Image (cartoon, grey):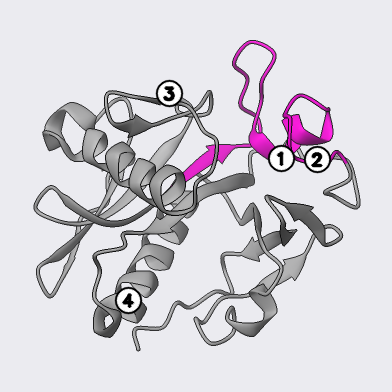
Amino acid sequence: MKDELQAIHQQVATTTLSFANMHRHGELFANLLRARKQSFIVTRQWNLPEALGMEYDQYDNPSSRWIAIHEDEHVLAGARITPTTARCGVYSYMIRDAQRGLLEGIPTNLLEDEAPVSDSIWELTRGFMATDVPQRRRDRVRAQLFTGMIAAAQNQGASRLLSLIPSNWPRWVKYCGLDAEAAGPVIPIEGQPHQCVYFNLATSRPRFI
């Protein structure tokens, strides 16, 4: 189905959630937001909105899709993709809104050029892996997450994903089988250097290590 990908590998499923299909997956969407709280608020101590034990923000709206790597309803990893054409009140998508000065804590100079608005470019945010995933499984779960988010974005007509990630990305993208290029300068966020990056989907081949 257009908004849903189910791929089983060693009892681990990849599901792309949307507002249109989440009712078919029980607690999976809620568990994804709970896992995000554990990853971003509890572990990384980011100052983010939360309610009912879940982390959320204004980009968790019907325009987005959420990729969940899970065993039954237990979430191992996840990510969110949002079209760069999205609009919700004064907001569009995170990187563009930061460039427009709407988001406190993210510099406005995070891109070399004006933030794109294109059907072929989606934004990748809130990528995480649960802290309880054993080290021996992390490479495989990570590769499955990359595979799922690329498939989900391509299913929506995207050819590139734009993301703000830690600036050490050149050390691991090729190892993971991804094709990426810098889209802006290195900037400090939460005391750590970050950089905007384009992931080229057609030439990315995530590796199962």
Q: Residue at x 27, y 23 (%)?
A: 52
Whether 121 is drawn above or below 203: the answer is above
Marks 2 and 1 in Cβ contact (< 8 Å): yes
Q: Nearer the viewer, mark 2 or mark 4?
A: 4
Cα separation, mark 3 vs mark 4, equals 30 Å
Q: Is residue 205 magenta?
A: no
Q: Nearer the viewer, mark 2 or mark 1?
A: 1
| Nearer to us in this view, 103 or 84 | 103
- Mark 2, residue position: 115
- Amino acid type, callout 1: Ile
Q: Secondary structure at mark 3?
A: loop
**Residue 50: image location, x then y, percent:** 40, 27
Q: Which residues are magenta?
A: 79-108
Mark 1 or mark 3, earlier in chain: 3
- Amino acid type, callout 2: Ala
Mark 4 or mark 1, earlier in chain: 1
- Mark 3, residue position: 62
